[in-house]
């Protein structure tokens, strides 16, 4: 199951309130980037075939695009150093080709490794990867949103918000959660898209394969 957070302005990703150097880009002539699309191929809406998505990325002059499952995950190489511009370039390309503009969440390899390293449930025994969801946010929602989120009643689901990632563990599975996702959307006020832990680690595997191929 994939959860997404709706953007305040439909069709276009808003600029974060505060943009760090890590959020804006990275250094190097050619780098690997992980992109995740929000709410594609969900419930028959915003449908994109992955071969068509790879072809689009190639048309945008990205190198070696690799897709994973049908939820809009693409790992690719690019010389573009500004992640904000990359986000808008991908979003505009999808809008022209497929007629809708999903939110696009980007992470660098180092950021994805950090997401895995910061897993707040890593040391707990019995955690099932398929029940652990990471929601990748477009920006840090800030202290006020963080405080409001901690005040939400989410039992039996457990939430941990760390920077631009929201970790959620569903002990009873994701099919019928007690968690009010609408309340989380209203609280965080920033776009995001969720991937279960198996997908997160697989994306890192694909990322490292591309990095090794370039070396």
Image (cartoon, grey):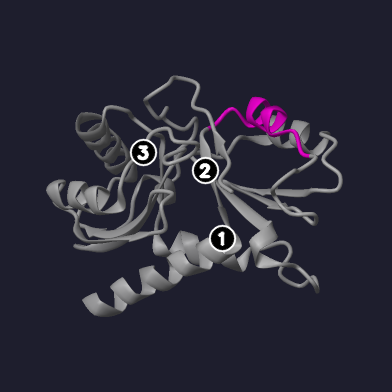
Q: Position of residue 172 (x, y in %)?
A: 80, 54
Residue pictured at 30% horizontal, 47% vertical:
49
Q: Which range is magenta?
A: 179-190
Query: Label 1: few (<14), some or many (≥20) within 10 Å?
Result: many
Residue pictured at 59% horizontal, 27% vertical:
189
Q: Which residue is mark 1?
A: 115
- Is the residue 120 above or below the residue 40 in the image? below
Magenta stretch holds residue 128: no
Q: Secondary structure at mark 1?
A: helix
- Is the residue 110 above or below the residue 22 in the image? below
The tag earlier along the polypeptide, 1 or 2, is 1
Q: Which residue is mark 3?
A: 47
Q: Which residue is mark 2?
A: 193
Q: Position of residue 194 (x, y in %)?
A: 56, 47
Q: Could you tell me how many numbered marks the image carries? A: 3
Q: Position of residue 5 (x, y in %)?
A: 56, 33
Q: Nearer the viewer, mark 3 or mark 2?
A: 3
The tag earlier along the polypeptide, 3 or 2, is 3
- The quadrant holding residue 147 is top right
Distance from disc 3 to disc 1, alpha carbons, whole Å, reads: 28 Å
Mainly helix, strand or loop, the magenta region?
Answer: helix
The tag earlier along the polypeptide, 3 or 1, is 3
């Amino acid at each position: 199951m994939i959860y997404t957070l709706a953007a305040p302005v439909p069709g276009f990703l808003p600029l974060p309130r505060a943009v760090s150097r890590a959020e804006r880009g990275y250094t190097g002539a050619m780098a690997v980037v992980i992109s995740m699309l929000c709410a594609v191929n969900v419930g028959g809406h915003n449908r994109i075939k992955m071969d068509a998505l790879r072809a689009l990325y190639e048309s945008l002059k990205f190198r070696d695009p690799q897709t994973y499952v049908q939820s809009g995950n693409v790992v690719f190489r690019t010389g573009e150093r500004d992640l904000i511009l990359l986000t808008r370039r991908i979003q505009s390309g999808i809008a022209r080709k497929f007629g809708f503009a999903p939110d696009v969440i980007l992470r660098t390899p180092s950021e994805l490794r950090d997401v895995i390293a910061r897993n707040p449930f890593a040391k707990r025994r019995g955690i099932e990867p398929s029940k652990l969801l990471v929601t990748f946010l477009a920006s840090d929602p800030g202290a006020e949103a963080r405080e409001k989120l901690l005040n939400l009643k989410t039992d039996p689901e457990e939430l941990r918000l760390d920077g631009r990632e929201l970790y959620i563990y569903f002990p009873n599975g994701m099919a019928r959660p007690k968690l009010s996702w609408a309340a989380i959307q209203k609280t965080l006020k920033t776009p995001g898209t969720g991937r279960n832990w198996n997908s997160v680690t697989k994306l890192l595997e694909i990322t490292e394969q591309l990095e090794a191929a370039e070396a």
